Amino acid sequence: VNEQLHIVYVSQLAPGHDHSVFGSVCRTARQRNTELGIAGVLLFDGLRFCQWLYGRPAAVTQLMASIAADVRHTDVSVWLQALLPAQDFAPQWRAGFVEHEVLDGFATLQGAATPTLLEGLAALLTQADLEPPLPIPALGLTLGSRVPGAPG
Amino acid sequence: MTRLPAPIEPSLFKRSIEQAARARLALPVLLLSAALAMAVNEATYQHTTATLSRGIALTDARLEAARTLQALTELEAAARAYVGTGSDTERARFDQAAQLLPRLQDKALGLVAQVDTEGVLGVAAVRNLIDEHAQRLRAWVDASAAAPGGSAAAGFDDARSRARSASLAQAMDALLTQAGTLQQQARLSLYDAFLLSRFAVHALVLLALLALLMFMRQLRRADLQQAREHERLEGQIRERTGELRDLARHLVSAREDERSHVARELHDEMGGLLTAMKLELARMKRVPALPQAALDRIAGFEKRVNDGIALKRRIVEHLRPSSLDQLGLNAALEMLCTDTAAVAGIVVTTRLQPVALDRDAELSVFRVVQESLTNALKYAHAHTVEVRLEATATHALLSVRDDGRGFDPAAVGAGHHGIAGMRLRIETHGGQLEVRSAEGAGTEITARLPLADASISGPSRVAAG
């Protein structure tokens, strides 16, 4: 009950789709995720998506299933799936952009241990252009103990 | 709100009187009653005066009638004496009495005529009797003078003279009695008149009193009604003001929601496009064997895309000041002022103390500063702006002062609605906004907001552990 399911995946924009997919995904996800109590960050570099989701395990699992079935992206590769201690927070889901090279840098961590991945994710987020932006004080924190976007 | 006493339900009687009083005829009826009462009173006065005068006349008439009868007796006595003696003294006595008699008779009968206003009494008959008696006596005296001796005395029928004299006195007495009866009737009718007058005056006084009471009552009711109406209107104003404030609050929050929505759309759609363009450019750069000129062009293009991304961020930040949530009011204001100073090339100084306001009030303060800075640049063409934020024990005090052209705050013009909007926004938090400005004297906008209750103002933006 006191645990949240964290999922990080990377996928590719499906052939035949363009950047406008990001806008339409955001439009539905912003409201739906808040309603489901799911937080996280969706990043886009122009071609690749990287999404980190966390929340009640059942809700996250269900959401992840529908994401995997979405035809607007392909090569969905889950890099992290872990139950972590829950944080007391108001669910905040963000979306934003990272430069291609920055996401490449994060991609080198594929297959790494969970703490390493989360640290890499925190570093990635500091370089992203997010809406809503991250609370500044949260930026320097290690994800293992604090989750970005979770008000203290 | 003081509760007014419930209107007292008047009785049927009272209601009908009040209805009558309210009717159009009320005033004419009142005036008519007054006129009638005055007429009755006046008539009574006239009647009284006349009756009193007639009473006096009757008393005098009695006196004069006695004198007249006495004069007749004297005339007759003098005639007898003269006829008996033939003395000149007696003759003189007779002449004197004969001379006196008409005056007395006229006086007495004139007084009787005064009492007998309608001429029903036989005044003329009595006058004739007196005249006839006097003439016979004179004729007898004259005959005696012409033929002195017994023949003249014999020519006078003493018994008939005595009878005439007696009937004369009787007629006179009857006349006076009748006059007395008339006077008695007049006196009786005087009582009636007094009674009528009394009732008329009483009725008028009562009517006037009633009218006065109703008038006072009406006044009181009017006052009460006015007070009720006043209260009702005040309540309505309070209600409307509350509605307007709610509407303003709603509009403010709707506007902020809309801004957030636009900010997100701009970020998501435009950001997606620019990011994709950036990726394309990065790929294009990696195309083998590109001439240097093409690479230069691509670099220029990339720079513009980056400018576009920066512009997008600025617009988004302007639409929803994320710095407010991230850093707090004072830091957000510092950033806003620094950015404005840099973009517009003016001097913006800040003196900001920490103040405890809730999230919405902070946003309103931020928006007021934002709009004031815009006004200072756009309309006032200011060179320096000073932004101050201070805290008293109960209130946060904001002041934005510029050295621009200034304006007449009383005049309606450009920026008027902006100021009205700022004021309304501050008022939704229970605060006040004032504008001090004059042509050529700069502008100072001050806002005073109650500090948030310590129990309500949570540190919503603090995320540090």
Image (spheres, helix red, strand yellow):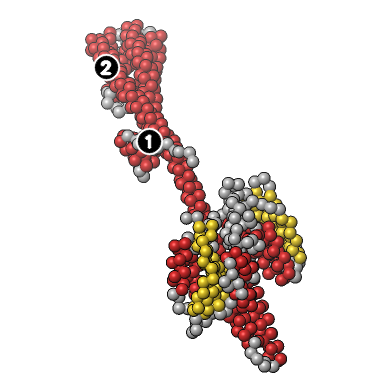
Q: In the image, A47: left or right of B136?
A: right
Q: Chain letter of disc 1?
A: B
A96 vs B316, nearest the viewer: A96
Q: Which residue is the site of mark 2?
A: B174
Q: In the image, A43: left or right of B67?
A: right
Residue B32: give x, y in percent of width and height. 37, 38
A92 vs B167, nearest the viewer: A92
Crowding around mark 2 (Cα neighbors within 10 Å: few <14, some 14 to 19, many 20+) is some
Give the tally of numbered discs: 2
Residue type of the residue flagged with mark 1:
Ile
Cβ atoms under marks 2 and 1 closer than 8 Å:
no
Q: Is residue B186 above or below residue B216?
A: above
Residue type of the residue flagged with mark 2:
Ala
**Residue B217 quadrant:** top left
Q: Is residue A144 above or below residue B10?
A: below
Crowding around mark 1 (Cα neighbors within 10 Å: few <14, some 14 to 19, many 20+) is few
Q: Which residue is the site of mark 1?
A: B8
Q: In the image, B138: left or right of A120?
A: left
Which secondary structure lies at badge 2? helix
Residue B132: give x, y in percent of width and height. 28, 20
Give the residue displayed 51% in from the left and 66% down from the top. A81
Q: Is residue B12 above or below residue B288?
A: above
B71 vs A87, nearest the viewer: A87
